[in-house]
Amino acid sequence: MGQRVTFLKETAHQILHVLRLSDDDQVAVLDNSGLIHYVRLRVDLSTNTVSGMILATQPVQSEPKTQLSLYFGLSSREKVEWILQKGTEVGVSAFYPFYSSRTLVKPASLSPKKLERWERIIKEAAEQSGRGRLPMLHAPKDLAGFYFDAVGFNDLCLLAYEGAGDDGLKLSDALDCFSGAKIGLFVGPEGGFSEGEVQAGLEAGCRVISLGKRILRMETAAMVLPALVLYVLDE
Ligand code: SAH
């Protein structure tokens, strides 16, 4: 409390020229450490700089206790952007786009500019939805390269497979008695996972789950799955 803060140029621009705030206006600042600071602004129009005084600091209440990592098949620009935006709103903590045998997008088509744009989409969605921590965007990799990392990192990994039939676990059963902190969720591309990819996931230690009798588009599954997991976990 009482501490002074100075805003970065880009944020100062947003405060002055987009939000049109001025001296003594108050803003809520998320610092990406899980804290929210209430700040009284000081504006210097001669230099276009904005600073402020912290009036109060609190932990952000909106962060889920369970850290969800979403592994999803790379798709068209619009679909990926939609998944990142909605996933951030719903409560995903990290995104891992992957290439697999049925993804339409191949590594050569990903420019650093595209990744920057995706990071900006996550940041805007995090601000809009009041996330306490910015979800991480990881560089795309081959699906096989993610399986073992995911199983090592997470306490539980679930792979959504529409072809699981009666062998597919219900989400509520898969999460029954779950007491860990990290869950990895795998959603396939438009063409789905091949049988070999599902088998490799199972061998790595993923559990195959069903999302019901209807087949969802990949972007629908990528949003519904994290939302349902957090719902079942009471988050
Ligand atoms: N290839 C399939 C559909 C793929 S849907 C077909 O055209 O018939 C894209 C992804 O969404 C799948 O790989 C899966 O991860 C997920 N998904 C969609 N519906 C699902 C369901 N009913 N149960 C589990 N996963 C599902």
Image (cartoon, rainbow, N blue to C red):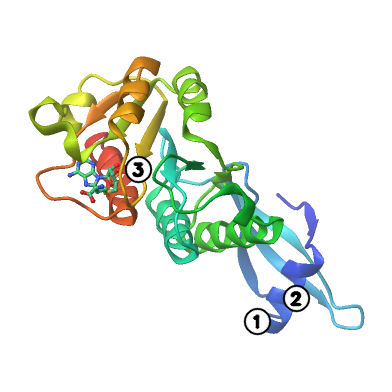
The response on whether ligand 1 sits within 8 Å of label 3 is yes
First in sequence, mark 2 or 1: give its number.
2
Q: Amino acid at mark 3?
A: Gly
Mark 3, residue position:
188
Q: CA distance from mark 3 to mark 2?
A: 40 Å
In front: 217, or 26? 217
**Residue 201 percent location from the top left of the image:** 36, 24
Mark 1, residue position:
18
Quadrant where the C terminus lies? top left
- For label 2, the crowd category at 10 Å Cα-Cα, with few meaning under 14, some 14 to 19 and many 20 or more, is some
Name the residue rendered at 48%, 28% in the picture. 144
Q: Which type of secondary structure does the marked residue at label 2 adopt?
A: helix
First in sequence, mark 1 or 3: give its number.
1
Ligand 1 in which quarter = top left
Q: Amino acid at mark 1?
A: Val
**Residue 24 percent location from the top left of the image:** 70, 75
Residue 11 appears left or right of 157:
right
Q: Amino acid at mark 2?
A: His
**Residue 234 percent location from the top left of the image:** 26, 37
